[in-house]
Amino acid sequence: MQISCFPAIRFRFDIQSCSINNLVTCYCESYTRVPTEIYCSNNHRRGTPTIIPAKLEDRLLKDYLAIIPARSGSKRILRKNTVLLAGKPLIAYTIDAALQSLKLTRVIVSTDDLEIAEISQKYGAEIPFLRPSEFAQDQSSMSAVVSHALESLAKEAADMDGVVILQPTAPFRTGKHIDEAIDLFEKSLADTVTAVCLAEQHPFYAWTLSNGELAPFFSLKHQTISRNDLPSVFYENGAIYVINKAVLNSGTIYGEKIVAYPMKLSDSVDIDTPMDLLWAQFIMNSEPRYLEEPNG
């Protein structure tokens, strides 16, 4: 039988169903959770109790809310979240990746813009509210945006074990990346897991400029150290944040224990400037894996 659990996603279940916490939960070979109340094709609300594999049981006990923050006021690329990349709105790639994830329970877009909301719904995300303008300014913090989303969802968000922030400017992040980051979050007992990428330029080689004169950002002695002798340096690529919900109550997305989820440079493209957009288009046109639809 086929059951629709997320918008625009259909799974085929052909093994069995069981009643857990008053929800009829069907599971298949990949042990994916269906986080909605479901009736099978025979309209049976309760299934025969069964022994659930430990791998499935662990996954059933955890709920993750994906929040895709997408405001309308981008500056360097006007209306960046709706700009077309290989014929699709930029935000669609992040929605596709979220819906491909086997770990996410719910995928919402937090936006202040009706066009972004319409596009997001078209590609399968939920729009349970429109973000007020005070949370859609240049100075609006990510923690404030996420806190507003959780407050808007109220009781629905209370049952979530963690929040996953997916910025729509990372078109090469996949559902597999998301699931791996969540796995790392669970195994490491982190407060926050953030996706990172190896820095191409080491900050020890950086300079400051004042009145036309250069000064080393650190010290001149660092300028003579071989790159191979320097510690590796990483930067956040903005693709994935997995956060313990309790951390958000302190007004930040970073808890005491922050664990890195490394990603390849080619998967870490962050669309911020027109040049970034051209680079992303070049990658999609050059690599075979991007010649197909992201959810195809």
Image (cartoon, helix red, strand yellow):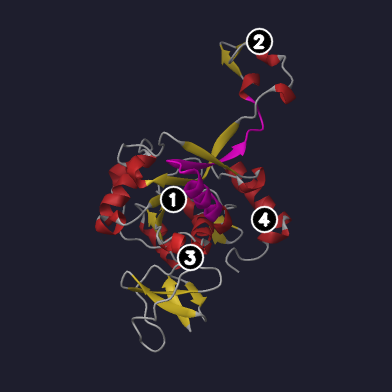
Q: CA distance from mark 2 to mark 3?
A: 55 Å
Q: Quadrant of residue 230?
A: top right
Earlier-in-chain disc, 2 versus 3: 3
Could you tell me residue 223's position as x and y percent?
A: 69, 15
Q: Disc 2 residue type?
A: Leu
Q: CA distance from mark 3 to mark 4?
A: 35 Å
> Is 270 positioned to the left or the right of 292 in the image?
left
Q: Which residue is mark 1?
A: 164
- Secondary structure of residue under mark 4: helix
Instruction: Kindly indicate whether the residue at mark 3 contacts the one at mark 2 (C-beta within 8 angstroms).
Output: no
- Residue sitting at x 70%, y 56%: 285
Could you tell me residue 44's position as x and y percent?
A: 35, 85
Residue 56 bears which disc, if any? Answer: 3
Which range of residues does the magenta coloring cover? 178-202
Nearest the viewer among 287 and 5 is 5
Instruction: Kindly indicate whether the residue at mark 2 contacts the one at mark 1 (C-beta within 8 angstroms).
Output: no
